[in-house]
Amino acid sequence: MVSKIDHDSMNGPHGDREDEAEGLLAGDEQDQPDLSEDFKSQERKYSDKRVPSLLERLNSKLSFRRRSNWLPIYELQDRMHSSSPSQSPRHRKRPISSIVFSCCYITLAISGLAAILGVLLGYLTLKSSDTFWPEYEGANATNYPLDVTRDITPVPCHSHNDYWRRIPLFDALHAGCISVEADVWHYGSNLYVGHDIPSLTASRTIESLYINPLLALLAHQNPKTEFVEASGRGVFDTLPSQTLVLLVDFKTEGNGTWGAVMQHLAPLRERGYLSYWDGTNVIRRAITVVGTGNTPFTRVVENSTYRDIFFDAPLQLFSLKNSKDEAPVGEPNMEPYSPSNSYYASTSANLAIGIPWWGRYSEAQQEKIQDYMQGAQKAGLKARYWDTPGWPVGLRYYIWTLLVKMGVDVLNVDDLVGATSGVWGSWG
């Protein structure tokens, strides 16, 4: 239906349209003198009521033409309101901005679909490549991936909060980390592993997540067959002499937790898998246990002839710039910590060094990092900074690169794949 416009509306500024419409009607009457029965009936319909306006007659005429496959009515109407046929809806070009937006929407839609497809394919690939991973559920697991370190090169990284991994211990080993962390809570006779009390469960104990898997892994690495009776080999196939650090973070009261930890380490101790101090030298074995958190240093050093739990010393005490009485560099600050009782020297990067404003450490901050590390290394300990920024990723990579360049002994990491893939820099 074409809306009716009163004849009076064609007067005034629209007089030109009336002249144009009259010309069209006059030309049509010359070309088509005999009107169809439909058009005549339409005129009789209007004549019975009132004289139709000029626009009504024109609309009726054009409606008939549309049914007779003549010029479409909307094109002719559009020509009445525009100076050129190119301005009609059929001929009007789309704005460039509309085309650009349409292309952007299509590109985003394709990118979204590609991302979803990539996630699905990645998940399927992960599942298909996990043939040697068991369905691991803590103490309920009966089969372990004993060849987890095949073709794995050990790298100096520490798996922070390792118990949060999809498969604790094994994910870190599969990435090549030489150090893992377990937070332990002493309740009754058990040591439960978790970040806080609400996260503790009966099946997640130090035995199920670490002690028993390590026993199985080391038995696999040290077979007794008709060909060989191997011993002294660590968990890494490619570097059997590399020790694995088990950093045990005491969360409950130190003295009570100490006795429980000593008891739970007995199976590893009995098989000769633990590094120890024999009163004169450190004998390095497959597993080196280091106590941190509420670990009581007095219990670590109470036995002067044998120790198999080492201490995580405070790194900030090893500053070379704080030497007293012009003594040899580092010596006043290294006491009472030494390789006989300690393995790591660690500290919070945010507390000891400060925030890397503008995404970079200042020269003074870098000097402090270097000072602490050199002091600990001179004392024979391994320097470790924890609580380093994990985000943004670019800042994290910058700090990792800086620490490795300065000679840090181990990187404290949460992103195992990011740390060991080498995309951020080089370990060399």
Image (cartoon, rainbow, N blue to C red):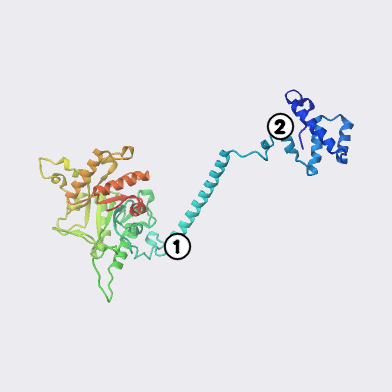
Residue 411 coordinates in the image, percent (x, y): 29, 50
Question: What number of labels is visible?
Answer: 2
Residue 52 coordinates in the image, percent (x, y): 84, 30
Q: List the residue tagged with mark 2.
A: 81
Q: Tell which residue pokes out farthest to the top in this image.
A: 12
- Answer left or right for 133 relative to 177: right
- Answer left or right for 81 relative to 99: right
Q: Can residue 293 be seen in the rendering of this structure?
A: no
Tell me: residue 12, above or below residue 66. above
* Three-letter amino acid code of the residue under disc 2: His
The answer to which quarter of the image holds residue 88 is top right
Q: Can residue 170 be seen in the rendering of this structure?
A: yes
Residue positioned 88% across, 32% down in the render: 47
CB of mark 2 within 8 Å of CB of mark 1? no
- Answer left or right for 192 relative to 298: right
Q: Tell which residue pokes out farthest to the bottom in this image.
A: 226
Q: Residues within 10 Å of mark 2 (few under 14, many from 20)?
A: few
Residue 231 coordinates in the image, percent (x, y): 24, 68
The answer to which quarter of the image holds residue 268 is bottom left
Q: List the residue tagged with mark 1.
A: 128
Residues 146 and 375: in front is 375
Residue positioned 81% across, 32% down in the render: 56
Tell me: residue 337, above or below residue 54. below
* Three-letter amino acid code of the residue under disc 1: Ser
Nearer the observer: mark 2 or 1; the answer is 2
Distance from the alpha carbon under mark 2 to that under mark 1 = 67 Å
